[in-house]
Image: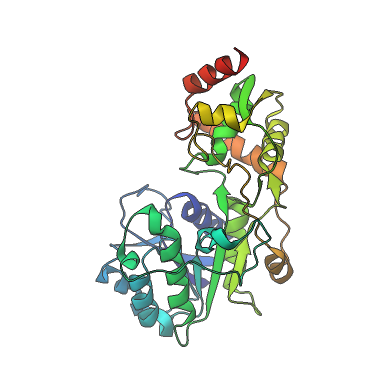
Amino acid sequence: MKKILVLGGTQFIGRVLAENLLLSGNFEVTLFNRGKTNAGLFPDAKKIHGNRETADLYQTCNEYWDAVIDISGYFPNTVQAYAQRVKDNCRRYIFISTASVYNLENSANRLIPEDFELLTCTAQQRTDATMATYGQRKAACEEALLQCPGLDAIILRPSVVYGPYDPFDRHYYWLYRTKKRSRILFPEGNADIDSFTFVQDLARIIIAAIDLPQHRKVYNVNTHPLMSLQAIVEAMTQACNTAPQLTFAGVPFLDEQEVQVWSDLPLWMNGSFLMMDNSRLLSDFGLQMTPITESFIQTAAWYEQLGWPLPKTGLSLEEEDELLEALNA
C-alpha cells in the first residue's frame, strides 16, 4: 500500500480527501494536524499531532512517503523550510493552492491559463495572517515548492470550492434559498461568468495526482464549464426539484440599499469574471467530472442530513424580505 501523508485532513477539502483515500483501500493514510478539529474522525488513519508552523511538522520527515498532500500550507517560509527537509523522503508533493494567486486586476475578464501573471508577495506579507494577503502568500508558497531542488511538486489551483462539509456557505446561500424560499432576491443581469470546483471532484483529482506519470507542474482545477451565477441557481432548482421565483434587482437599487458585492450576495461580482482555463487538467488527468446538477444533488443530501441550517454568510432572511418589499414598493 502506498503511504500518504495529509497535512490537514479534518475540515472540508481535507476531510473529503481523507474519506476517499481510506475508502479506496489502496493507501496507508497518516494525518498531521493539531488534533483540535473533528479529532474523532478517521480512527483507521494514523495521526500525528502538532503545529505545522513550528518544528512539530518535522516529525513527519522521519519516514518515507509516496506522496505528501499539503492542504494547510499558508505561509511560504514554513512551506519552504519543510520542503527542504522532506524532499528526500517524499516521492511527490501535492500542494493545494488557490485561484486567488492570480493578479486579476490585469485579467481584463479573459480566460486565465496557468502561466497568467501571479500576485507578488512582500517580505512583510509572507508572515501576515490576514485574508488580505492570502493570495500573495499562496503564490509565494508555490514559488518555494517549484524552486526546491529535487522535489517533484504538483500545484493544484481550485476555484471557489463547494460541496459537503463546506464551512463558508457561499454556494449554500443560494442552495438554501432554492430549497426553502418561494422568492429569491437576485442581482439583475447575467454577466458574471465564473469558475467553480466541486469538492468530490477535487479529491479525485488529488488522488489521481499521486501517480500521474507525465505531469506538468501547475493545474487550474475548476471542475465545471464556465457558468453564470444564474445558471448555477437554475442547476440548484433542478437538483432540489423546486421552482422559486428569481426577483431581479438592478445594481442602482442594490447600491442604494448598500447591498455589498460578494459578502451580501455570495458569488455575485457585479460584472467581474473568474474564468479559469482547465484544458490542461482535462487533457492530462482524463477524468470525468461530476455533472453540475448531480453535484448539487449530492450537496443537498448533505444539508438534508443537517436539517438545512440557516446559511452563515450573506443577507439574513429578514434582510432579504425587507429588500424584496422595498423592491416592490
Residue at the extreme bottom: 149
Question: What's the coloring here?
Answer: rainbow
| Residue at point 71%, 34% (across, down) | 234
In the image, residue 131 sits, relative to residue 87, either above or below, namely above
Q: Position of residue 266 (x, y in %)?
A: 54, 38
- Whether residue 25 is visible, yes or no, is no
Residue at the extreme top: 329
Q: Position of residue 261 (x, y in %)?
A: 52, 39
Q: Position of residue 101 (x, y in %)?
A: 50, 63
Horizontal side of 118 relative to 132 (left or right) equals right
- Whether residue 275 is visible, yes or no, is yes
- Number of residue marks: 0
Q: Which of 253 and 87 lies nearest the eye of the viewer?
A: 253
Q: Position of residue 316 (x, y in %)?
A: 47, 25
Q: Which of 142 and 163 lies nearest the eye of the viewer?
A: 142
In the image, residue 50 sits, relative to residue 77, either above or below, namely above
| Residue at point 54%, 43% (across, down) | 164
| Residue at point 50%, 39% (across, down) | 169
Q: Point out the image quarter for the C terminus.
A: top right
Horizontal side of 278 relative to 16 (left or right) equals right
Q: Which of 34 and 30 lies nearest the eye of the viewer?
A: 34
Q: Which of 156 and 295 lies nearest the eye of the viewer?
A: 156
In the image, residue 307 sits, relative to residue 292, either above or below, namely above
| Residue at point 56%, 46% (across, down) | 162
